[in-house]
Image (cartoon, rainbow, N blue to C red):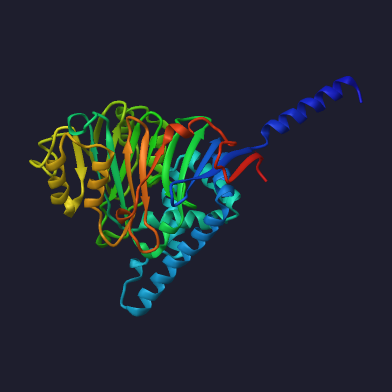
Amino acid sequence: MTRFVRIAVAILVCVCLAAVARAEGYRTTVGEDKIPLVVVKGTPHEMGFAFGKLMQPECQGLIGPFLEGAQLAERKAFTKDPGKPPAARRYTDAILDAAWQSTSPHIHKRFQEQMRGQADGAGIPLESLRRAYMIPVVSDYSCSGAALWGKATADGHLYQFRNLDYIMEGGLQDFPAIVVALPNEGIAHVSITFAGFLGVNTGMNAEGTVLTEMGDSPAKEYPYDLDGVPFFVLFSDLLHDAHSLDQALDIVRGAKRIKKYHYIIANGKDRSGVKIKAHAPELVVWKENDPKDEVAPRVFENIVYNAESRDPLAIRHIKENYGKYDAARVIELTRAVPIKGGNLLAVVYDATALRFWVSYAKGEVEAYKRPFTEVSLGDYLKYEPDRPGVVGKVSGPER
């Protein structure tokens, strides 16, 4: 072998090795409930793969049964009531595939690569994963949330909460997952979610951007126009890219959105937040104490909130605790306004100190009735796979 050939081969080997995707991540637990917390780093595909690999049993235990359960429940409902129009169906393979085809042109390549990685790591067909991700896209549900800061809080920090109210029968609450992402490109962030689901229903990034979502699309408006981006992908984009509240609003305004939602988006460094009525294509942004807010004149300085029919409960609590809010009092507010019977998840954030408190439902006991576990995002921003308490890790080429 000539010297030239040896050099060429060496270069080719180096290039090939550099092209091998490396998954990096570890798994630990937090709180008395030992909630799984997974830290992943790298490219979108690498992070998705690490998540899927580290939570493979839970991903497989949730995705297939969740999808099959939704489809079985729908088949039983149509058998019981054969007069239901075919257009009312939501969860057949064909409908979920059509939902993916409609939304996927608007889904960032970054998110799609993350899904591919997750499917590879968890050993789940990508087609099944896509269908499961489309279930919330074609479903209707409702939640609650608020952001409070400045004069409304005891220390001036920005606090925010998010109640996720869905259905207990789906069993999502039995597969909790906190995911800290350390992307090669973008802002480090945390998503409080469920095994198998890397979409963001709520979360916070290292720049203090914090997110709450509430679904508004009623069942009577189904089938929905799905020519746009699902909210959980939009929220993923916000956590990756929004360094400030203004940047977050620019991203939302620039997105082709679907369905009807309310969002509460705030930033703990800016110490400011907004409530958004995102009824596609309509977009209305209300700031604190806004006389044009839909709940006016029941508005407050340094607070935005949305609890729908539970608004009177929120208002009473705010009036009694204004200026005194800390994490404990915001947890009290969170517990005051869930939709009882379906409160799967409750999260309270201190987006100024980058801390959060989380409660998952367990079995049939709803989240608002259970203890909250405190977590510091700052504890996980430095990648430490050999830290005490690690119960599993991935390091090396994806296999």
In the displayed structure, 103 sits above or below 139; it is above
Query: For residue 326, what is the image quadrant?
Result: top left
**Any part of residue 29 in sight:** yes
Tell me which residue sits at (34%, 41%) in the image: 256
Query: For residue 263, what is the image quadrant?
Result: top left
Tell me which residue sits at (7%, 41%) in the image: 297
Residues 248 and 269: in front is 269
Query: Residue 137 location, x and y as percent?
Result: 37, 54
In the displayed structure, 397 sits above or below 84; it is above
Q: How many marks?
A: 0
Tell me which residue sits at (67%, 46%) in the image: 399
Query: Residue 340 location, x and y as percent?
Result: 26, 60
Residue lying furthest left in this view? 297
Residues 92 and 77: in front is 77
Query: For residue 328, what is the image quadrant?
Result: top left
Residues 345 and 335: in front is 335
**Any part of residue 202 in sight:** no
Query: Residue 70 location, x and y as percent?
Result: 42, 65
